[in-house]
Amino acid sequence: MPDACHAFVERYRFASFPATIEQMTAEPITFGHGVFGDATISELSIFNDGVLIAAASPTDNLDSFLADVMKWSKSTLGLDRIETHAVSKMYESHVLFRTDRDILAPLGVFGDLCRQVSSGIKKATGQDAKFETFGFFLSADHAIGPGLKPVTFRIERKATLEFSMGYYVSSAPLRTKDHVAILQKLDALSPALSA
């Protein structure tokens, strides 16, 4: 195990890794801040029943990284996955973007509610706070269906920045390219912000 761990760390240049036998046999076995191609692998955690990979990189790079790990592990260490069942895969991508369009315009139906909240705060505290729609969420019903549960699809304004700046954060249970395609479609359908 120590030799395999050392070879793995050397191949992917991980800066943090299990250093003791206890850490190498604990769950999860976690490696941090590695390199694959031009991607930095923030975290690779190995569990008894799965693997978690996190990086500030498109998901296609992570798929390539995992394929490389599997191929290298087999050829170098003699480790191979025993095919006992289908592999379940789940994606979670996060995108920060800016647009000159009002992508939350369809939520304008909540304008009266926003005004009521603003008015209620003014009456209760004297504070002027103009409420606007902040984001929206789409979710699968996690009570239905077995297996891995996809994360919520969400688009929210970037906190701490003026709404008028047009910065948003989006999370999705999708590959990066599919996530970006949805955001581009939404942007194209949205009206331009008024000056």
Image (tube, helix red, strand yellow):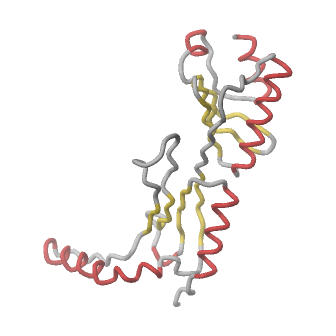
Residue 35 lies, in percent from the top left, at: 75, 36
Question: Where does residue 5 sit, x and y in percent of width and height?
Answer: 71, 17
Total number of numbered labels?
0
Relative to 148, 32 lies left or right: right
Q: Is residue 35 above or below residue 137?
A: above
Q: Residue at left 62%, top 41%?
A: 54
Percent from the top left, x then y, of residue 143? 39, 48
- Residue 176 image position (x, y, % from top left): 67, 56
Q: Residue at point 55% right, 24% down?
A: 28
- Quick one: 2 or 107, which is closer to the camera? 107
The answer to which image quadrant residue 10 occupies is top right
Residue depicted at x 51% and y 59%: 153
Residue reaching furthest to the right = 75
Judging depth in this view, the residue of 177 and 54 nearest the camera is 177
Asked if residue 133 lies left or right of residue 57, the reply is: left
| Quadrant housing the N terminus | top right
Q: Seen from this angle, which residue lies furthest left?
A: 124
Outermost bottom residue: 195
Residue at (64% x, 23% y) in the render: 17
Q: Quadrant of residue 83?
A: top right
